[in-house]
Image (tube, grey):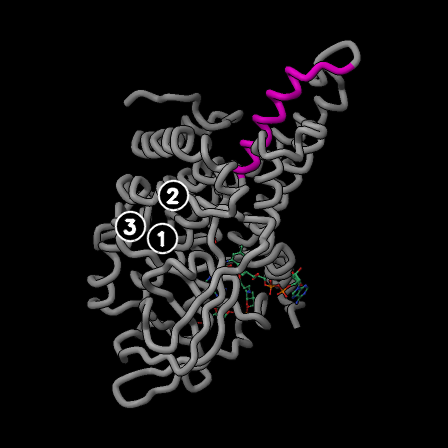
Amino acid sequence: MSVSSPPPLDFLGLRDLLSPEERMVADAVRRLVDERVIPVIGQHFERGTSLLEVVPEMAGMGLFGMHLQGYGCAGMSSTAYGLVCQELERGDSGVRSFCSVQGSLVMFPIRAFGSEEQKLRWLPKMAAGEVIGCFGLTEPDFGSNPAGMLTTARKDGGSYVINGRKRWITNGTIADVALVWAKLDGKIRGFLVEKGAPGFTSYEIEHKMSLRASITAELIFEDCRVPEDSMLPDVEGLRGPLGSLNEARFGILWGALGAAAACYEAALDYATNRVQFSRPIAGYQLTQEKLVQMLTEISKGQLLAYRLAQLKEAGRCTPAQISMGKMNNVRQALEVARTARSILGANGITLDYPVIRHLLNLETVYTYEGTNEIHLLTLGREITGISAFE
Ligand code: TGC
Ligand code: FAD
């Protein structure tokens, strides 16, 4: 298979540690991003439109639920999934978000906690990109603390009746199925709510200045009636949504490095060509210090991501370790993007370069899937044994 562009930013030669299949999938996704995402993503971001035209190709490459086994899923390694997230987010965080929500936040919980009928019904179509899913956990007044959610479900004959609101839901207006977390008799349960279910409406949240090439929505449930086989039978409590988030956070800790790499590459290219005073700005020590710092943080983040993938494949990766990866890699990616923006000077604020778009996107990535502070406190609890959340 020919490779149309250089391998991913890889100062430490991590590519040597990858299997042939992992290299092949990363290269294929890199080509997809080079050819189908990067040329148009600036326009999508400016207009606030999602890049849905690449969904069939992503599905055709087996990217949706790629780390799951059976039911039409590709069954690839955690490392391959991480590499794919890194490549997708080199294009845009919104494209990686689509993959995270579909594969990790909707397909994973159906695979892990669903009935056989639910798995057979939803997973093959979701893997094929024929059915789009969304994940409704956050509410207007309950973000970092989902345990306090107000959305309820009650049993009524052969149905459940759902009431409440979910906010900031990626793909909420285009999803064919929403995985909605609601309290049934005080215990959190997951419900698969189909588009068009009576009492279920959604609208898109406008005026976002971040993740503009991704749809974000509010979901409203007013006596929304779903059949009783809509509930995921095998999970109760926060373990359901948090277990799913663990999968998605693993993808994000890789993905953020892709956004950082795109910013680094743009800054390096700009600095070697932009002449001020007597030479290219890359020739000034202050610029070199910035570039070296960026490259070093990206490389350290990749080592962390690779080690977490090894642990995950061995079944030994803990939520606290994932928190360290999400907190560190997103925080550093944001720092890299800000530094890259400074190297580009005034040009750094235009969509003619990818940097400001990645920088604005990373502000969302810093907040969703557990804020920077929540992951910090998760680690604080892990090492002290004392919870500082409440
Ligand atoms: P805690 O008592 O720690 O745990 C409750 C139960 O959950 C289990 N658990 C986990 N399981 C798997 N992975 C994890 N990361 C887990 N963390 C906890 C735990 O074992 C326990 O199970 P069990 O069986 O004993 O009941 O829960 P807590 O109430 O102390 O948690 C507090 C806190 C703050 C850590 C938690 O609420 C939290 O993580 N808050 C952040 C909320 C969040 O991340 N929301 C994200 C919404 S979705 C989203 O942002 C998608 S963006 C999509 C895109 O990419 O576009
Ligand atoms: P809050 O929880 O109100 O936090 C505000 C600030 O207070 C943060 O800095 C936080 O760290 C801090 N804080 C909170 N509690 C503490 C504490 N105990 N100690 C110290 N500091 C604290 N959610 C979904 O369910 N599904 C989705 O698909 C989804 N997609 C999203 C897409 C986008 C574009 C965005 C922006 C968000 C999305 N979210 C989604 C929601 C996201 O997960 C929440 O925004 C996030 O969990 C934080 O919640 P919040 O915004 O209510 O902030």
Q: Quadrant of ligand 2?
A: bottom right
**Tally of numbered discs:** 3
Quarter placement of the N terminus: top left
Q: Give the x, y percent position of residue 351.
A: 59, 34
Mark 2 residue type: Tyr
Mark 3 residue type: Gly
Q: Quadrant of residue 112?
A: bottom left
Mark 1 residue type: Gly
Q: Nearer the viewer, residue 385 or 60?
A: 60
Q: Give the x, y percent position of residue 260.
A: 57, 36
Give the vertical position of 301 relative to 133 (above or below).
above
Going from N to C along the chain, the mark reached first, 1 or 2, is 2
Closest to the camera, between mark 1 and mark 2, is 1
Residue furthest bottom as drawn: 157
Residue furthest right as drawn: 277
Label 3 residue SS: loop
Q: CA distance from mark 1 to mark 3?
A: 10 Å
For mark 3, what is the residue?
Answer: 129
Q: Is residue 299 visible?
A: no
Closest to the camera, between mark 2 and mark 3, is 3
Quarter placement of the C terminus: bottom right
Going from N to C along the chain, the mark reached first, 2 or 3, is 2
**Residue density around tag 2, few if under 14, some if 14–19, many if 20 or more, within 10 Å:** many
**Residue density around tag 1, few if under 14, some if 14–19, many if 20 or more, within 10 Å:** many
Q: Give the x, y percent position of residue 328.
A: 60, 46
Q: Is residue 315 magenta?
A: no
Label 1 residue SS: helix
Closest to the camera, between mark 1 and mark 3, is 3
For mark 1, what is the residue?
Answer: 103
Q: Nearer the viewer, residue 151 or 247?
A: 151
Q: CA distance from mark 2 to mark 3?
A: 17 Å
Q: Are marks 2 and 3 in contact (CB under 8 Å)?
A: no
